[in-house]
Image: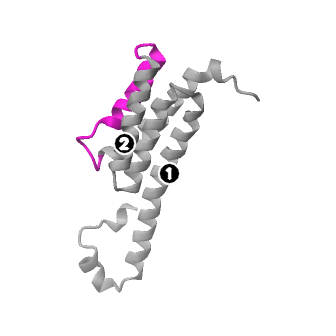
Amino acid sequence: MKINWQEDHRLLAIWAADCAEHVLARFETHYPADDRPRRAIEACRAWVRGDLPMAEARKAAFASHAAAREASEVEAVAAARSAGHAAATAHVATHAPHAATYAAKAILFESEVKVELAWQYAQLPEHLRAVIFPTWDHHGL
């Protein structure tokens, strides 16, 4: 099946915004005062509705990517990149798959960390687990 990028541009933007919004908490948990990724998703949706010019959505995309560069947690970086690509979809439809890819990376990184922590926990002698991981809920995996 061939995609008509022009006809499906807005549908791809909606999907990209949905993907980015689905992982946004991975950024906001670490940076609750930084709303640049959220504003990028909102800009994408506003562009779809015809309420925002493409150039403004693009500015929001750049701001979200700046937030990603400033973040240090890999899942937060990926979530902010996802939001940036969602907003950039207003400019070029082919940004939409990048929004989805970065959303998946946000989840992947989080999952890898949990798997690694579970492995580390399991390797410790039982009597040392509470000392090394005093606040970690290993049952929450």
The amino acid on which the numbered mark 1 sits, given as a three-letter code, is Lys
Res 55 → quadrant = top left
- Is 32 displayed left or right of 55 in the figure? left
| Circle 2 SS class | helix
Horizontal and vertical percent position of residue 131: 24, 79
Res 9 → quadrant = top right
Residue at position x 30%, y 44% from top? 28
Residue at position x 38%, y 26% from top? 42
How many marks can you see? 2
The N terminus - image quarter: top right
Label 2 sits on residue: 66
* Residue 105, numbered circle: 1
Say which of marks 1 and 2 sits in front.
Answer: 2
| Circle 1 SS class | helix
Which portion, as a residue range, is magenta? 29-52
Horizontal and vertical percent position of residue 105: 50, 51
Residue at position x 27%, y 40% from top? 34
| Image coloring type | one colour
Q: Earlier in the sequence, mark 1 or mark 2?
A: 2
